[in-house]
Image (tube, rainbow, N blue to C red):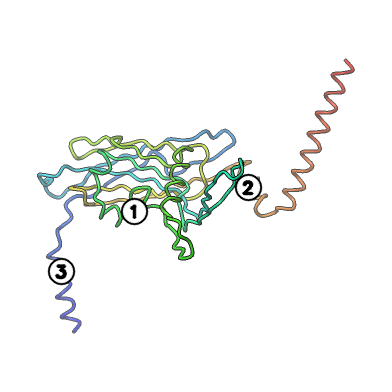
């Protein structure tokens, strides 16, 4: 039985098309440090296509680069005007949404990846958001998902950059991804896809680590690990600042 199964797997492997193209990629930096003066960063992503035989003719090679921040549940609320006042009316919790999402392509996204492979590899920003199934609401979750995407696009957290991957002779490629100042700490998954005819031929994955350092790291740890001490310290600093401003003001009045 085991021998029969081994032979079956062997013949299935022979029937599958051989992967003749492979991504070899690198980053200008794989670590981003958030300090008090951090105003954003830019990552250069570059690479080449490794082949063991000439590229196939017909469908041109395309490249997609995806950088995805840490995901977490998000509650999206809908506002409506009631008696002249804007109030929250409906709300829906999305299972998980990335804090940052950037997609760069060598051609328009619709021409670069098929709907099937977009679903399979979760490439577009719409596919990256996991929607909660709530049987007790008649609201369409896609409306809330679209609202979240629109808000984060306006904040520079979700971006689609078509035709920004420079691809030279179907071999060398590079692009730049801008990381805004309001980044969330964590590992940013970076994926590179090679596609032909809309289907993924090869992919590569690495991680960019984003972390607070220095005084910001100390304050962050203090606020989360010692909230009582953090609150008392904040109160002391506020009192000292108020007293100092008052003393300076009285000194100016006397002079």
| Label 2 environment density (alpha carbons within 10 Å; few <14, some 14–19, many ≥20) | some
Image position of 168 with respect to 230: above or below: above
Q: Distance between the residues labelled 2 and 3?
A: 53 Å
Residue nearer the viewer, 130 or 195: 130
Q: Is residue 33 left or right of residue 189?
A: right
Residue 156 position, x and y percent, is 46, 37
In terms of secondary structure, where does tag 2 sit?
A: helix
Q: Which of 93 and 205 is in front in this view?
A: 93
Q: Is residue 116 left or right of residue 81?
A: left
Vertical placement of residue 10 versus 237, above or below? below
Query: Residue at image x 23%, y 38%?
Result: 172
Q: Is residue 42 left or right of residue 23?
A: right
Nearest the viewer among 159 and 149 is 149
Closest to the camera, between mark 1 and mark 2, is: 1
Residue at image mark 3: 12
Could you tell me which secondary element the residue under label 3 belongs to? helix
Q: In which quarter of the image is the C terminus?
A: top right
Image location of residue 241, percent across then percent down: 78, 34
The residue where tag 1 is placed is 122
Q: How crowded is mark 3: few (under 14 residues within 10 Å), some or many (20 or more)?
A: few
Quarter of the N terminus within the rendering: bottom left
Q: Distance between the residues labelled 1 and 2?
A: 32 Å
């Amino acid at each position: 039985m085991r021998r029969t199964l081994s032979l079956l797997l062997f013949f299935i492997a022979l029937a599958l098309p051989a992967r003749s193209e492979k991504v070899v990629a690198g980053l200008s930096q794989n670590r981003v440090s958030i300090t008090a003066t951090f105003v954003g960063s830019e990552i250069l992503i570059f690479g080449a296509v490794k082949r063991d035989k000439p590229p196939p003719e017909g469908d041109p090679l395309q490249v997609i680069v995806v950088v995805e921040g840490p995901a977490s549940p998000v509650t999206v609320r809908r506002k409506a005007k009631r008696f002249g006042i804007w109030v929250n009316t409906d709300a829906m919790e999305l299972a998980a949404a990335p804090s940052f999402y950037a997609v760069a392509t060598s051609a328009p996204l619709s021409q670069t990846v098929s709907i099937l492979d977009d679903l399979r590899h979760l490439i577009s920003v719409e596919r990256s958001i996991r929607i909660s199934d709530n049987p007790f609401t008649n609201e369409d979750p896609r409306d809330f998902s679209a609202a979240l995407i629109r808000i984060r696009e306006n904040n520079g957290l979700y971006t689609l950059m078509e035709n920004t991957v420079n691809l030279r002779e179907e071999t060398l490629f590079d692009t730049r991804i801008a990381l805004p100042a309001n980044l969330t700490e964590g590992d940013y998954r970076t994926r590179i896809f090679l596609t032909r005819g809309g289907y993924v031929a090869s992919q590569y994955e690495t991680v960019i680590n984003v972390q607070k350092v220095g005084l910001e790291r100390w304050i962050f740890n203090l606020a989360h690990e010692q909230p009582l001490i953090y609150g008392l310290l904040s109160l002391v600093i506020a009192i000292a600042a108020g007293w100092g401003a008052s003393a300076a003001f009285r000194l100016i009045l006397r002079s």
